[in-house]
């Protein structure tokens, strides 16, 4: 299995250069109009020459900041996007090394966390360039809880993160023994052409909230918690045709993301049956609507706990009242306009590959040796030639 190479990964075709110029023109024109920066012609001439000479172009800091903000504004499925002008843009385009990316991601988390007063932040790392793809962060968010597969298909932790957890272990991550329900995963950062490396997040960079309920004393004993900053790290930012494959960004949580989905969903932490049992609900029939009662208390507990801890969170009622995006929305089928964020699919491919080839290496309950087989599978998934890996 070989990854499809993006246009920036190889030598750009002439048509690729033309479409890059067309994207640049659209974006730079928008930049000049919205920022009342006069006619864009001079800048466009410059960009045209730069593209002809190098196959890409470098945004000015002002263009990058504007582009990242508009990418948020254009994210039609995001209910919080009306806050787009307040996005803090950390320009780290000179940073491409895995350890530096991890360190800057930690700095991102600290700036975003701000003692609980969450600030929307994006950190933009090195762009893709012809023949020189930029770095990647493989985790779906900077902070994620591990999901460990146990015998008989049971999972400890967050089932959404089983693939990345397996990969972290195969790459030599040794924490997570014994497996806990809320173990924070290391960042898996991949420099172009290299295997990813795991980087532990310092505990004091990750703010978490213990979930308790304003009325039910037993609720705290469920031992539920969640982190404060949802920082998406597996999407690439496209600004004017330039791809930034590592550009983690965050806003703050809406309570139902955590209550209804992360903790409540049957394919995630699946807490509704447990809560219902403590509430003494009759769960024998769906027709008692016991799930609706339990989910209401779980969402209330999340909202209450974050608020009591002084951590920014919005409730789904308040947020949808002020947003152009409804709480329950469906994509209209059209991909969002650039500048925008688009999903990488590399990890899905890697996960598939691991499931097929390398399970034996990472079976639960046993330290994986630093696995040759799985590393090869991984390298193959990313299109890295074996010869390169074996040397
Ligand atoms: N739904 C995701 C989660 O529960 C986070 C997505 C981004 N959410 C946000 N409020 N910015 O982790």
Image (cartoon, rainbow, N blue to C red):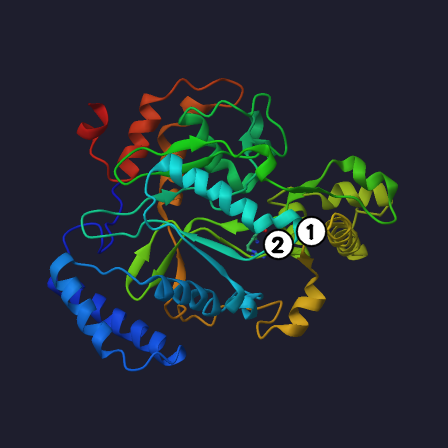
Q: How many other residues sit within 10 Å of disc 1, few (<14), some (14-19) or many (≥20)?
A: many
Of residue 188 and residue 154, the one placed in the foreground of this image is 188
Query: Residue 334 placed where, x, y %?
Result: 40, 71
Q: Quadrant of residue 280?
A: top right
Rendered position, 223 above or below 316: above
Residue under the image location 55 percent in, 41 percent down: 144
Query: Residue 114 placed where, x, y %?
Result: 61, 49
Classify residue 27 as left or right of residue 154.
Answer: left
Of residue 160 and residue 65, the one placed in the foreground of this image is 65
Identify the disc placed on residue 118. Answer: 2
Residue under the image location 30 percent in, 77 percent down: 29
Look at the numbered disc 2 and say if its residue's Cβ is closer than 8 Å to ligand 1.
no
Q: How many other residues sit within 10 Å of disc 2, few (<14), some (14-19) or many (≥20)?
A: many
Classify residue 217 as left or right of residue 247.
Answer: right
Of residue 1 and residue 248, the one placed in the foreground of this image is 248
Q: Earlier in the sequence, mark 2 or mark 1?
A: 2
Indicate which quadrant contains ligand 1: bottom right
Q: Secondary structure at mark 1?
A: loop
Classify residue 4 as left or right of residue 232.
Answer: left
Query: Residue 15 placed where, x, y %?
Result: 14, 66
Rendered position, 101 above or below 344: above
Tell me whether circle 2 and circle 1 mark residues in contact (CB < 8 Å).
Answer: yes
Query: Residue 141 placed where, x, y %?
Result: 50, 46
Classify residue 254 as left or right of residue 50.
Answer: right
Residue at the disc numbered 1: 311
**Count of marks placed on residues:** 2
Look at the image and tell me in which quarter the C terminus lies.
top left
Identify the disc placed on residue 105. Answer: none
């Amino acid at each position: 299995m070989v990854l499809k190479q993006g246009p920036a990964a190889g030598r750009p075709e002439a048509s690729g250069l033309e479409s890059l110029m067309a994207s640049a023109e659209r974006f730079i024109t928008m930049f000049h109009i919205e920022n009342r920066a006069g006619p864009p012609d001079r800048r466009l001439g410059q960009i045209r020459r730069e593209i002809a000479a190098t196959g890409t172009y470098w945004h000015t800091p002002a263009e990058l900041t504007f582009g990242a903000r508009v990418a948020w504004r254009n994210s039609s499925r995001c209910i919080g996007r009306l806050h787009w002008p307040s996005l803090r843009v950390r320009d780290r385009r000179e940073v491409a090394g895995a350890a530096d990316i991890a360190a800057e991601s930690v700095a991102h988390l600290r700036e975003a966390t701000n003692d609980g007063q969450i600030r929307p932040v994006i950190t933009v790392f090195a762009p893709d360039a012809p023949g020189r793809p930029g770095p990647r962060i493989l985790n779906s968010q900077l902070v994620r809880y591990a999901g460990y597969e146990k015998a008989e298909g049971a999972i400890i932790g967050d089932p959404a993160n089983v693939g990345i957890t397996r990969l972290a272990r195969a790459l030599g991550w040794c924490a997570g023994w014994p497996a806990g329900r809320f173990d924070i995963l290391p960042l898996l950062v991949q420099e172009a052409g290299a295997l990813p490396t795991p980087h532990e997040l310092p505990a004091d960079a990750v703010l978490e909230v213990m979930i308790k309920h304003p009325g039910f004393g037993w609720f705290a004993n469920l031992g539920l918690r969640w982190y404060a900053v949802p920082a998406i790290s597996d999407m690439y930012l496209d600004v004017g045709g330039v791809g930034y494959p590592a550009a983690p960004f965050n806003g703050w949580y809406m309570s139902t993301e955590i209550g209804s989905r992360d903790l409540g969903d049957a394919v995630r932490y699946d807490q509704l049956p447990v809560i219902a049992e403590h509430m003494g609900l009759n769960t024998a029939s769906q027709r008692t609507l016991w799930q609706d009662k339990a989910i209401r208390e779980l969402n209330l507990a999340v909202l209450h706990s974050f608020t009591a801890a002084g951590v920014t969170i919005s409730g789904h009622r308040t947020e949808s009242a002020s947003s152009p995006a409804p709480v329950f929305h469906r994509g209209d089928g059209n991909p969002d306009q650039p500048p925008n964020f688009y999903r990488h699919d590399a990890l899905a491919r890697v996960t598939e590959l691991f499931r097929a080839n390398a399970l034996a290496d990472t079976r639960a309950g046993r330290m994986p040796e630093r696995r040759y087989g799985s590393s090869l599978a991984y390298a193959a998934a990313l299109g890295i030639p074996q010869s390169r890996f074996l040397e």
